[in-house]
Structure formats: C-alpha cells, structure tokens
Amino acid sequence: MPADFNLLVLVCIIALIIFTTFMLILSRYKKCPSDKVMVIYGKVGQNSDGSSRSARCIHGGAAFIWPVFQAYEYLDLTPMSISVDLRNALSRQNIRVDVPSRFTVGISTEVGVMQNAAERLLGLKLDEIKQLAEDIIFGQMRLIIATMDIEEINTDRDKFLDAVSGNVETELKKIGLRLINVNVTDITDESGYINALGREAAAKAINDAKISVAEADRNGAIGSANAERDMRVNVSKANAEATAGENEAKVSVADSEATRREREAEALRRATAAENIQAAKAQEESYGAQQRAEEAKAAYEKAKLEADIIVKAEIERKKREVEAGAEAEQMRLKAKGEADAILMKMQAEADGAKLMLERQAEGFMKIVSAAGGNASDAIRMMIADKLEQLVKLQVEAVSGIKIDKVTVWDGGSNGDGKTSTANFISGLMKSVPPLGEMFDMAGMNLPEYLGTKKDAAETEAPSDPQNENAAVKADA
C-alpha cells in the first residue's frame, strides 16, 4: 500500500511539473494588438553588420519571449493631437508673425522608424512624447517661417504646408514618430501687415467694383443718346433718300439697261477670248501631257523589258543552281547506294566463302577422323573417291582428236631400238599426264592398291624388228 501511494504521488508531481511548464510556455507566447507595437529587448540577435541588436519590434503578429533572457513592452499607436501656438516667429522680411496650428502625430510602423521609436520612446508616457514632438515642431516651424515672405505664407498655403510637412516629418522620424496631419488655423502679425494687405485687397476690390459700375452707367447713357440721335437722322435721311431714290431709280433703270447690254457684249467678248485661250492652253497641255505619257510609257516598257530579262536570268541562274545541287545530291545518294550494295555483296560473298571453307574444314576433319587420325590416309581416300573423275578427264583429253586416216610407212628401227610407229603411239599416249606424274606434282604417292612404278629395265621391252617393219593402216 505505501509503495502504490508513493508511485501515485510521484506521478502527480510529474504531471504537475509538465502542466506548469506548458502553462509557462503558453504565458510567454505574446500576441501584439493592432494598435500597439511590441518591443522585445534583451538578447534578440545581431544586425547584418554583426553588431548586437538593441530591440526587435513586432506589429500585428506574435512572438515567444524567452524567460530570463528577454523582456517586452508595448508602444501605443494612438494618434496624438498637438496644439502649436507659435508666437512672434521672425519671417524673412523681419516681420514677426503668429501661426497657430494643430499637428497630429503618432508612432510610426515603418521598419526603420519603428526601431528608432523602440530605442528613444520606450518607457515614455504619451504626455512626454507629445512634449518632445512639440519641441521639434516649434523649432522646424520657426526655421521654415524664417525662409519665407509674409505674402508666401499668407497666400500660398499649399507651399507653406508642404514645407512644414517635409521638414517636420523628417525630424520626427529620427525619434520614431510620423506626421499624420497639419492644420494651420490662422496667420497674424503684431505690426498689422497682414491686415493691411487684406484691407488693401478689399479696398482695391471695392474700387474696382465702383469703377465698373460707373463705366457701365456712362456707357448706358451714351448709348441711349446715340440711339435717339441715330433714329432721328436715319428717319430724315430715309425720307430724303426715298424721294431721290424714286427719281434716280428711273435713271438707274436706263443706265442699268445700257450698262447691262454693254457688259453683256464685253462679257461675251471676254468669254470668247477666254474660251479660245483656254482651248489653246488645254490643247498645249494635252500635247505636253501626251508627250510625257509617251516618254513615261517608253521608260516603263524599257524598265519592264530590263526587269523581265534580269528576272529571267536570275530565275535561270537559281534554276541551274537548284538543278546542280539536286544532281549532286542525287549522285551522292546513288554513289552511296552503289557503295553500300557493293559492300553488302562483297560481305555476302565473303560470308559464303567463309561458310563454305568452314564446311570443307569440318568435312575434312571428319574424313581424317574416319581415317584414324592419319591425314595421308584421308588424302588417299579423297583421291580414290575422285579417281574415276580424274581418269574420265584423261580420256576426254584425247577423245576430241579426230583422225580420219593414218598411213605409216615404217622404215625400221631408230637408234633407241624402236620403230617410228611405236614412237608415234608412245608420244601420243605420253601427251596425257600419267597418274603417277600427277601425284608427284601434287607432292603425294599413289596408293598401293593402284600399283607401284616399274624400274627402267623392266619397262623396256625387246623390240621385234619384223613387227616394226609392218605397215599399219588405221581408219578412224
């Protein structure tokens, strides 16, 4: 029982340690809200140049904070509205002006600027950050106003605001802030220069309006009087002119008729002359145009003929080049085909000859084996097998000789004891190669069953003088 209790206690302790460790790990995993910047400081790694980093900034994410080695704090991103009541700022004209304005700033989330905020603003309260930003804004506003005239500040507000925004935001970034908005409420000066400029502009506008009204009234009165005068003059003139017009109308009709006829005659004359001149010019231009057309046609025909000749020559040259190339390619292919065919034929013949020699060698080896391994006996067997053909060839050698009639007049024996007839028959038979000589030329001996050579003494037979003197007549 005590052992089981101790084991249960040990298990509970281990489980408690594991649970505590897990909760500790969870408690050290921190998430950054969207309206804050989480600054992790301590041992946070190194920069790209190898120096130690002072802090790591996270916006809109989460990170694990190592216990003992790291800690964290938050920077609030809530915008801060700063009222800048700038008084007695000296302009470029040495006139002191008052520029009350309101600036809205906040901690920047830009990567490099956020690091500056972590290094310079961490741990400060919002009021302290506002005071620091207000000092920077006051200094930059005085600097900008010192470089501008009163007229530029008062009339060109966009230029003034752009200058203020650029300079102020540049300086605010150095401590990790960004400029969100600038609003200049009013611009005044202690000497009343801006009010004087306003009164001057107002008076000028009023005077211009009065002058415009007076000029309009004057133009209206003058226009009315002129209109009445013109009406009376025009009426009287119209009556007089009506009477004179009636009288002159008749004269004018007559003069007009005469003038019309005169002008018609003159117009007819000018028209006829103009027609003749224009016809001559038209004919001249026609001839010139026809001549130019003929010249252009001749040039066109010449160019066309030259182009046809050149094109035909070029086509013929290209055709010859193509035909030569095709013929060369065809000859190359033909030569290659013939070479391949010859090579295949020679290879086939060589393979056939090799196969035939291999078969002959195998047959000869079998013959030698049948002869008990004696090559000489094998050769004799082969010759004995071909003996019939050899004898047949010897007989065929003299079978073609056709002798119609042979008449021999034997005059007796010669010096060797033989008659002329015997010598003729012996020479005729000697013209056929004997078997023994054939074997000798082949470097072999006749087989013993074909007989052996006789000695020279045995081959000589006694001559019969009476038979040698006999006349032999043979009819073939």
Image (spheres, rainbow, N blue to C red):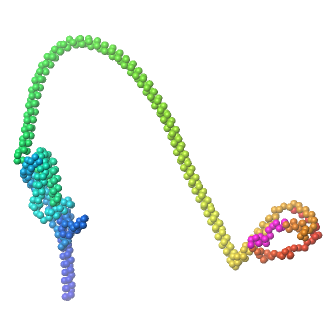
For the point 29% across and 14% down, the residue is: 260
Looking at the rendering, which quadrant does residue 459 occupy?
A: bottom right
For the point 64% across and 63% down, the residue is: 349
Q: Is residue 296 above or below residue 383?
A: above
Q: Position of residue 176 (x, y in %)?
A: 16, 60
Instruction: State the residue in front, 409 or 450.
Output: 409
Q: Position of residue 140 (x, y in %)?
A: 13, 54
Residue range of the region highlighted in magenta in the rendering: 428-443
Q: Is residue 222 above or below residue 455?
A: above
Q: Is residue 391 above or below residue 255?
A: below
In reply to whether residue 287 is colored magenta, the answer given is no
* Placement of the C terminus among the 4 image quadrants: bottom right
Quick check: 271 left or right of 169?
A: right
Quick check: 420 left or right of 165?
A: right
For the point 18% across and 68% down, the residue is: 41
Looking at the rendering, which quadrant does residue 222 occupy?
A: top left
Q: Position of residue 425 (x, y in %)?
A: 86, 67
For the point 9% across and 26% down, the residue is: 221
